[in-house]
């Protein structure tokens, strides 16, 4: 069984960038975030210049699994910020993350920082999940008493993405999208779960909008964003959304076309020197034989999440703390 502080046992992915600043290679993110991301001397990214909020979470109880920890931390962090009255949480559910943002565990601590989703996705990295004393081989979370279906905030118009737009995407990509996802993209591209969805088997919190089709280059454009994720996925996979703690990806080439996978960030199994092909073969976690199956797995706003998060906040185990900006400022 693998437990304990694993960050010191092997070089983290992209350790070659230790002590350097990594700049965004694509024009949209480079223009928005011109200062890039500094990697500290141990090879961990420092996102503090981008942090909009921060929380401190207590050490996990003995025997906690990594999926339990990840999920508990995210919902507790959101509940702490909502309790603190932070403006970003005015329009989201009690345990959901504001759209366009994601939580980052700071290496060597139990501090979490809220950073833009596209910043955290810059490159594979280790951080505070890997360096926390937790069982990294224990997967999944506790079963729910009742699983309610997830609901999506659909647009008022009949479709989100038109057939011509979908065909244009397929022309750019060089293949037809898997049917279940193709139908979803037309009906709900750019939409997000109402509140939050939870994949119980993996403890994956889905609370961000799914990618859509845009006329211009943008971080939420399905074609553009996938060009930004080549450190994470081969072209056999198409990322369809940012989830808390990783990417949701669709298999689009080879065996198992249409299946859905979770690519976790800050994964103790990941290590320096692996090719992207090795990463997808060794790290991706299955979460649905096709996109419909994936959606059916999601539980909508499980009350257990709010209960756990409330206990963490009320007990003082999760609390809002000041944002400490270090390194180069963003703007």
Image (cartoon, grey):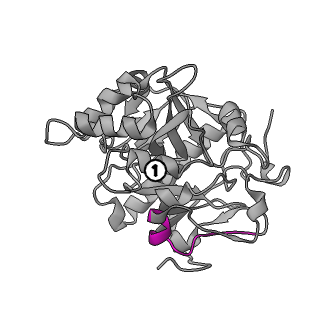
Task: Read off the magenta span.
Answer: 28-40
Q: Mark 1 points at which residue?
A: 225
Q: Quadrant of residue 169?
A: top left
Do we see residue 146 in this rendering? no
* Residue 38 magenta-highlighted: yes
Residue at the right extreme?
A: 9
Q: Where is residue 162 in the image (x, y as percent from the top left)?
A: 22, 37
The answer to whether 200 is drawn above or below residue 56 in the figure is: above
Do we see residue 112 in this rendering? yes
The residue sitting at 72% across, 36% down in the picture is: 278
Q: Residue 29 or 76: which is nearer the viewer?
A: 29
Say left or right for 143 vs 193: right
Say left or right for 42 vs 190: right
Q: Where is residue 150 in the image (x, y as percent from the top left)?
A: 33, 32
| Quadrant where the image shows the N terminus | top right
The answer to whether 110 is drawn above or below residue 67 in the figure is: below
* Residue 81 magenta-highlighted: no
Q: Position of residue 108 (x, y in %)?
A: 72, 61
Q: Residue 209 or 2: which is nearer the viewer?
A: 209
The residue sitting at 58% across, 39% down in the picture is: 263
Say left or right for 64 vs 75: right
The answer to whether 329 is drawn above or below residue 157 in the figure is: below
What secondary structure is marked by label 1?
helix
The residue sitting at 76% across, 43% down in the picture is: 274
The residue sitting at 76% across, 53% down in the picture is: 12
**Numbered-mark total:** 1
């Amino acid at each position: 069984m693998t437990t304990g502080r694993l960050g010191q046992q092997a070089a983290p992915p992209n350790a070659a960038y230790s002590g350097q600043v990594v700049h965004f290679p694509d024009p949209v993110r480079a223009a928005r975030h011109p200062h890039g991301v500094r990697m500290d001397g141990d090879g961990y990214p420092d996102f503090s210049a981008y942090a909009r909020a921060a929380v401190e979470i207590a050490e996990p109880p003995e025997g906690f699994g990594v999926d339990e920890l990840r999920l508990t931390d995210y919902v507790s962090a959101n509940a702490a910020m909502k309790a603190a009255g932070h403006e970003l949480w005015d329009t989201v559910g009690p345990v959901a993350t504001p759209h366009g943002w994601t939580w980052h565990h700071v290496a060597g601590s139990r501090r979490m920082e809220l950073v833009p989703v596209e910043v955290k996705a810059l490159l594979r990295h280790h951080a505070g999940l890997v360096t926390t004393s937790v069982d990294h081989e224990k997967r999944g979370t506790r079963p729910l008493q009742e699983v309610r279906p997830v609901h999506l905030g659909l647009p008022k118009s009949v479709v989100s993405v038109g057939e011509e737009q979908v065909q244009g995407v397929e022309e750019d990509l060089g293949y037809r999208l898997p049917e279940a996802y193709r139908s979803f993209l037309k009906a709900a591209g750019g939409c997000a779960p109402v509140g939050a969805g939870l994949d119980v088997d993996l403890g994956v919190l889905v609370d961000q909008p799914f990618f859509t089709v845009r006329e211009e280059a943008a971080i939420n454009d399905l074609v553009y964003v996938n060009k930004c994720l080549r450190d994470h996925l081969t072209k056999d996979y198409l990322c369809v959304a940012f989830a808390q703690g990783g990417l949701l990806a669709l298999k689009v080439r080879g065996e198992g076309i249409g299946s859905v996978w979770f690519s976790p960030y800050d994964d103790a199994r990941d290590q320096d020197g692996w090719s992207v092909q090795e990463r997808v073969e060794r790290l991706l976690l299955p979460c649905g034989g096709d996109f419909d199956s994936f959606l059916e797995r999601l539980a909508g706003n499980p009350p257990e999440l709010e209960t756990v998060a409330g206990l963490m906040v009320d007990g003082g185990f999760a609390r809002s703390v000041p944002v400490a900006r270090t390194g180069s400022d963003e703007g």
